[in-house]
Amino acid sequence: MTENKFEFRIEPLGKAHDRAAFSCGIAALDNYLITQARQDVEKRVSAVFICTPDVRTVAGFYTLSQYSVNVGALPERVARKLPKYPEVPTSLLGRLAVSEQFRGQGLGEHLLIDALYRCLRQSKEIASAAVVVDAKDANAASFYQHYGFIGFPGIADRLFLPMKTIQAMFEGKQSQRR
């Protein structure tokens, strides 16, 4: 990992962010940020968060939205711990990308941890049993699995992390700081 010479902050997508200069090397993610993200925010179908070192440059981004999951699609060991509803509310981490310019600085992890913490905080006011992701490829799936995400049986590249696991992750970090 290269030394991080920038101070990064994560903030909601704004007009000052230079979306056109962003390139992560995956056309679908680049095109989303450049052409669709602002509309999704305005229509309230997705919240877009930008990682930036200077208010203008987009070093990375992620999106969050509400989602629901059919309980029958979850692994049996997880489903049996949930209420007997046909669906449960979740949070969708729809997209996560780091600019090629800023690779190797731990920004993917920084973005993921910020997204998980944001979902955990929100789940106290708007219920969410888990965070769901659809990995774009095998590398993305491996990235999420490294952080404990579990695959959906029979749904390729769809993974989830139970909110209880996320809560335990952050409670552990807080007790380590003391």
Image (spheres, rainbow, N blue to C red):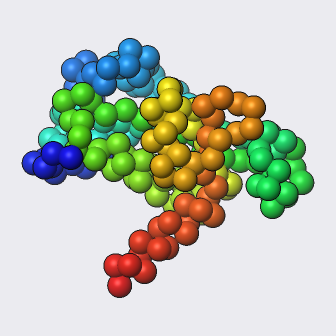
Q: Residue at x 14, y 41 (%)?
A: 54
Q: Residue at x 31, y 25 (%)?
A: 24
Does 3 appear above or below 117?
Answer: above
Does 174 appear above or below 121?
Answer: below
Q: Residue at x 59, y 62 (%)?
A: 165
Task: Tell me where residue 148 appears, x and y as whole percent.
Answer: 55, 53
Tell whether 84 sits left or right of 174.
right
Task: Tell me where residue 71 appears, x and y as whole percent.
Answer: 81, 45
Tell me how many marks there are.
0
Residue 16 visible from this viewpoint:
no
* Residue furthest out toward the left: 5
Tell whether 168 sits left or right of 13.
right
Q: Residue at x 34, y 79 (%)?
A: 177
Residue 110 visible from this viewpoint:
yes
* Residue furthest out toward the right: 84
Does 125 appear above or below 159?
Answer: below
Q: Quadrant of the C terminus?
A: bottom left
* Residue furthest out toward the bottom: 178
Tell whether 82 sits left or right of 100.
right
* Front position in the image: 59 or 20: 59
Within the image, what quadrant is residue 37 found in? top left
Task: Tell me where residue 53 appears, x and y as whole percent.
Answer: 17, 43
Within the image, what quadrant is residue 17 found in? top left
Task: Tell me where residue 161 appears, x and y as whole percent.
Answer: 60, 51
